[in-house]
Image (cartoon, grey):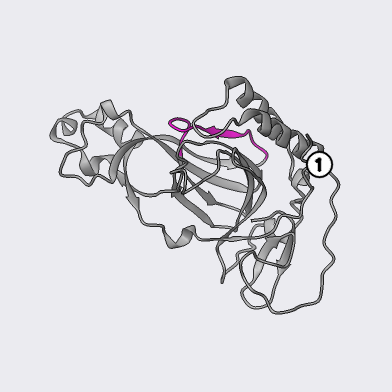
Amino acid sequence: MEAGLVEQGRGHVNKVSYVKRVIGKKRKPCRRVKRPVFAVSKALQELFVSCRETFKGPGTVPSPQDVQKLCQILDNMTPDDVGLSRDLQFFKPGNIIKENQRVTYTTVYKCDNFSLCIFFLPETGVIPLHNHPGMTVFSKLLLGQMHIKSYDWVDPEASDNLSQQQSSKLRLAKLKVNDVFIAPCDTSVLYPTTGGNMHEFTAITPCAVLDVIGPPYSKQDDRDCSYYRVHPYAAFANDKDEEIGNEMKDKNDSYAWLEEIEVPENSEMDGIEYLGPPITETA
């Protein structure tokens, strides 16, 4: 999912991209198109340097001081820092891609310790509920309006209501966020066990989200992405809960059972090459 120019391609193609090439997909030969040239973005370069200092590798969590520093940098970043503009056709409300609703992404930078990615969601586009095992993730909504819903697992010692008859894939979670965000807004942060580690994005208008992820997903290192289906808390409440009354209502609003599912069809994304402002890997 790359920030850049909006393409009105032939047929069903209509993507946000810096280039006219979708990664991993063959295209018919076409005339060379002059690529946009961006100057170095001071804010993006500062973000990169700070990430390199902050993320120490798998099994580590950034210190509160480092989290605050990264949030300050991201809070001050604008779409222009990654080559985007709200004037692009993609970001205009009502620009629904009827035949291709898939989310697009672009990788700005990636190493073993962290990655910088931009996700583009068309109007009504969804990134389904998924987790971030062992990761700390900073999300900065650059453009658009988005509904975010997120959960954290309830402490295992407080999850005794999970009966042995229920599937082992069904676990109790507490609702962390359920709100609409409008750019520009503050950066949100999730941690390995707090902050809404499982989240779902739904675009109200076309959106662009910059994610800083540390460490990145890795199947080899047991950091694969899992997806979930939400069940109301009352669906598996026991007899004791039914007698609680108002407290039960609060639990219905604040808790849910999450069932791990196979990779959903609407989780598929198109990857495109990043050609926004470059990052300089200084020594």
Residue 193 horizontal side relative to residue 63, left or right: left
On the rendered image, what quadrant is the C terminus found in?
A: top right
Which residue: 62% across, 20% down?
A: 65
On the rendered image, what quadrant is the N terminus found in?
A: bottom right
Amino acid found under the numbered disc labelled 1: Ser
The span shown in magenta is 184-197
One can see residue 75 in this view: no
Instruction: Using the image as rendered, state which of residue 265 and residue 182 is in the foreground.
Output: 265
One can see residue 241 in this view: yes
Which residue: 65% across, 57% down?
A: 93
Residue 137 placement (x, y as % from top left): 55, 37
Q: Main secondary structure of the magenta part?
A: loop
Q: Is residue 194 magenta?
A: yes
- Mark 1 element type: loop
Instruction: Using the image as rendered, state which of residue 157 and residue 180 is in the foreground.
Output: 157
| Residue located beneath label 1 in the image | 41
The 10 Å Cα crowd at callout 1, few under 14, some 14 to 19, many 20 or more, is some
